[in-house]
Image (tube, rainbow, N blue to C red):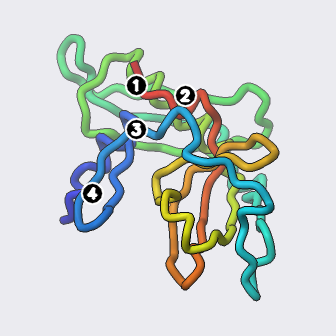
């Protein structure tokens, strides 16, 4: 099992990422400010990728409720379940998750609410290409577009140009938990 796989539970619960850079595992919270603003003039044009391609997952794939099973930290260390739900959802898709962590009820509720909000925002994704000189834009970094939206870079492919895949984030979701 990889180091990243062993850290997955903690990464999900406490909102940090593990990115391999130069053979080392870099652990960090998402930055509160974008690494760089990407305007149209900074884009590289590829044959199959013109400017920025935006995608939105279908409504049917949107999560409306998150249920989280955890071990109660206060008391008898029993298994508990907490839930977060959007009140405006008519058709609710539920994501059921289990964390092998000991948490207080408020910690578990905060995690479920953050996951729910993050799932809705992350429906939006994009692809774009940057020139090779844009070395500072790496996986795990946050960038902003000229329209002010923030995007977490999930994947960078080196093909002469730097092809990026990113998911939308909101500033409130970038803050590390208390």
Q: CA distance from mark 3 to mark 2?
A: 18 Å
Q: CA distance from mark 4 to mark 3?
A: 15 Å
Earlier-in-chain disc, 2 versus 4: 4
Residue at image location 55% in from the left, 56% down from the top: 153
Look at the numbered discs 2 and 4 and tell me whether their residues touch, using CB distance below 8 Å: no
Residue at image location 78% in from the left, 52% down from the top: 59
Residue 85 position in % (x across, y down): 63, 29
Residue 101 image-quadrant placement: top left
Look at the numbered discs 4 and 3 and tell me whether their residues touch, using CB distance below 8 Å: no
Residue 6 position in % (x across, y down): 22, 53
Residue 163 position in % (x across, y down): 60, 73
Earlier-in-chain disc, 2 versus 1: 1
Q: Of circles 4 and 3, which is in front?
A: 3
Q: Would residue 117 be found to the left or right of residue 53 on screen?
A: left
- Screen quadrant of the N terminus: bottom left
Label 2 residue SS: helix
The residue that mark 4 highlights is 4
Q: Would residue 115 be found to the left or right of residue 98 on screen?
A: right
Above-or-below relation of 43 to 125: below
Category of crowding for the residue at label 3, using alpha-carbon neighbours closer than 10 angstroms: few (below 14), some (14–19), many (at least 20): some
Residue 54 position in % (x across, y down): 77, 62
Label 3 residue SS: loop
Category of crowding for the residue at label 4, using alpha-carbon neighbours closer than 10 angstroms: few (below 14), some (14–19), many (at least 20): some
Residue 84 image-quadrant placement: top right
Label 1 residue SS: helix
User: Which mark is drawn over residue 29?
Assistant: 3
Q: Of circles 2 and 4, which is in front?
A: 4
């Amino acid at each position: 099992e990889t180091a990243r796989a062993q850290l997955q539970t903690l990464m999900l619960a406490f909102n940090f990422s593990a990115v391999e850079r130069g053979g080392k595992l870099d652990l960090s919270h998402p930055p509160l400010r974008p690494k760089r603003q990407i305007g149209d003039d900074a884009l590289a044009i590829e044959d199959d990728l013109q400017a920025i391609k935006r995608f939105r997952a279908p409504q049917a794939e949107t999560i409306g409720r998150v249920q989280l099973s955890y071990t109660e930290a206060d008391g008898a260390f029993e298994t508990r379940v907490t839930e977060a739900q959007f009140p405006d959802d008519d058709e609710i898709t539920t994501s059921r998750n289990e964390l092998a962590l000991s948490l207080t009820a408020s910690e578990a509720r905060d995690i479920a609410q953050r996951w729910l909000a993050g799932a809705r925002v992350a429906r939006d994704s994009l692809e774009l290409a940057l020139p090779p000189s844009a070395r500072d834009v790496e996986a795990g970094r946050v960038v902003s577009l000229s329209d002010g939206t923030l995007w977490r870079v999930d994947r960078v492919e080196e093909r002469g140009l730097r092809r990026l895949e990113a998911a939308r984030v909101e500033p409130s979701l970038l803050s590390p938990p208390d």
